[in-house]
Amino acid sequence: MSEELESVLNESRIFPPPAAFVDKARIAGWEALQALREEARADHQGFWARLAQEKLHWHTPFSVILDDSRAPHYAWFTDGRLNVSYNCLDRHLADKGGKTAIIFESDEGATRHISYAELHEAVCRFANALKAQGVEKGDRVVIYMPMIPEAVVAMQACARIGATHSVVFGGFSAQALKDRIEDAGAKLVITADAGHRGGKRVELKAAADQALAAGCPTVEKVIVYRRSGHDVPMQPGRDIWWDQALAGQGDDCPPEWLEAEHPLFLLYTSGSTGKPKGIQHASGGYLLNAVTTMEWVFDIQDDDVFWCTADVGWITGHSYVAYGPLAVGATQVIFEGTPTHPHGGRFWEICQNHGVTIFYTAPTAIRALMKLGDEIPERYDLSKLRLLGTVGEPINPEAWMWYYEVIGGRRCPIVDTWWQTETGAHMIAPLPGATPLKPGSCTLPLPGIEADVVDAEGNPVTEADKGGFLVIKKPWPSMLRTVWGDPQRYYDTYWKQFDGRYYVAGDSARRDQDGYFWIMGRVDDVLNVSGHRLGTMEIESALVAHPRVAEAAVVGRPHEVKGEAIVAFVVTRGGRPSGEAADALTAELREWVAKEIGPIAKPDEIRYAEGLPKTRSGKIMRRLLRAIARGEAITQDISTLENEEIIKQLQGEA
Ligand code: PRX
């Protein structure tokens, strides 16, 4: 039996919401969820307008709900004004000022509790510091920080004064940082002397210096948080320590009342071409869906301790660390380190010590921790957990069952949340007190989200279990607004395929006989490595930038823990290397890619050949390369290849 078929058959398992969970849930039971869906179906705009009024604080109420006059550049709540930071902080002060907003645990294990009042004060002071450094509404600020509360302070401070932030993941290289700073045209960069992860120091300031030395003419100032305490060079006139920037700044910083469409942030993500695109999000609509999903999908309650393990460098760390949990006044854990340092029980120890009730992580982490054995989590008291979540890639039923049984003690529903950088918030996901679960399925679209699976002509695929393109048929508040500086690319990437009618996610999916969605993977040249998106072209351009590389093609291959492994096929200048010379070049190229993009993009395997298989029109035959990387039999017609010998070389047989 094929693996695919087996997984379909296995997944007749259905897990209805546990009665004890339903009793206390915000949306309790299937009927309550259906009522929301019906409300949205009957009046899509009215539904979102009602929620926007109920869930957000508006300084100026909106009268326009959806402006579709420039579709597919949709705009929401256009004449309303609000401030995201006010919504996340100020509005809780009266009754929750003393409540813990953030429980921080450092890589070394030191903990800090920060109340809403303290966080508000820190954000206001830092916002004043940004203004003193010349940052104004509309300016772009790049944040290149470790996973520490100050990263959230920096993001919230930008939001408070209307500066548009762009967080660059601390694991990205100087080169990647430079590209993003330049594309965003950032005026100021916020970084740290270094970050600490898994017992190692990540030299953030050194990377920032390198990026700035190589270009970035728009950057005027760099604010440096002292995390590590080791010496780093500071450039006079440009660099200023975080503490110095704060000196003399008061904690009164009235929020800027911004238009709902004001760009809250840019976040760069990989696409089908070599250049990452700056996904631009707005303020009002983005925050609305961050809040509704915190309530619907995470069922957030006042006494919960919420922990989303994502770094603020990714969209998950924006919506479910920096904004969503604060907007609903929740207590959340922020952890600087890695799941297995200094031991494989670190995540479970944190859950136990801080009384985590809702835990949200990626399948790659679950699979890695599952491999370490059940004895490790069994050492910890995980009884406070009541809800588990996953994001970033499909979760295989085996990992789902392990998560459910060993971590959740068969008591915690699992919310498998499908969404993207572009969607801003969960799109297809269960409501834990309402939706019966099937391991491996993200279940059904949320209320107000019109997701579907369509064929190449754009017609709905009605046959059960037949694959097609995943599309969203109606605009939703937290959708991306454009690709920064490139509206044509926005149209071409997300709308062109169906003439502007549907948002095209770039994933393939199928629906089963109950209408449940099963995500099958990307249809474009995007890899999903450990839940992170990487463009094959991006890695290819990094490889060909190396003097020894003439041509490169990169494909994915299934990997037990990471989801996908990166396999590169390389044609070198000056003859095909073999033996030790090949090994040495492989090591060099892996380091090279780490330097060009970041360690996550390092190829797992590199194979050398005298040429790459191409079609008559000169296109690299990627499907063939994928089959070769997986060690599968070749079913394509290769009779037109000029040099069949290279297939043997790529297969490692010659
Ligand atoms: O392929 C889908 C996969 O991750 C892609 C989005 O990646 P990114 O923008 O980096 O955002 C990740 C965090 C939201 C999607 O196009 N993906 C995300 N969540 C799931 C998923 N695939 C299957 N199941 C999921 N729950």
Image (tube, rainbow, N blue to C red):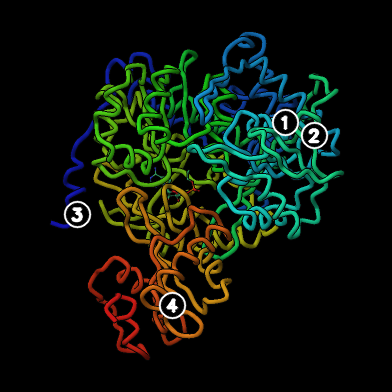
Badge 2 amino acid: Leu
Q: Quadrant of the C terminus?
A: bottom left
Q: Specify the quadrant of the image occupied by residue 84.
A: top right
> Do the numbered discs 1 and 2 sit on residues whose CB atoms are within 8 Å?
yes
Name the residue that disc number 3 marks.
Answer: 3
Along the viewing direction, whichever of 382 and 6 lies nearer the viewer: 382
Q: Say which element carries label 2.
A: helix
Name the residue that disc number 2 marks.
Answer: 130
Badge 1 amino acid: Ala
Check mark 4 vs ligand 1: CB closer than 8 Å? yes or no.
no
Along the viewing direction, whichever of 494 and 607 lies nearer the viewer: 607
- Dot in front, 2 or 3: 2
Residue 536 position in % (x across, y down): 48, 64
Name the residue that disc number 4 marks.
Answer: 620
> Do the numbered discs 3 and 1 sit on residues whose CB atoms are within 8 Å?
no
The first of marks 3 and 1 along the sequence is: 3
Residue at screen point 24% across, 69% down: 632
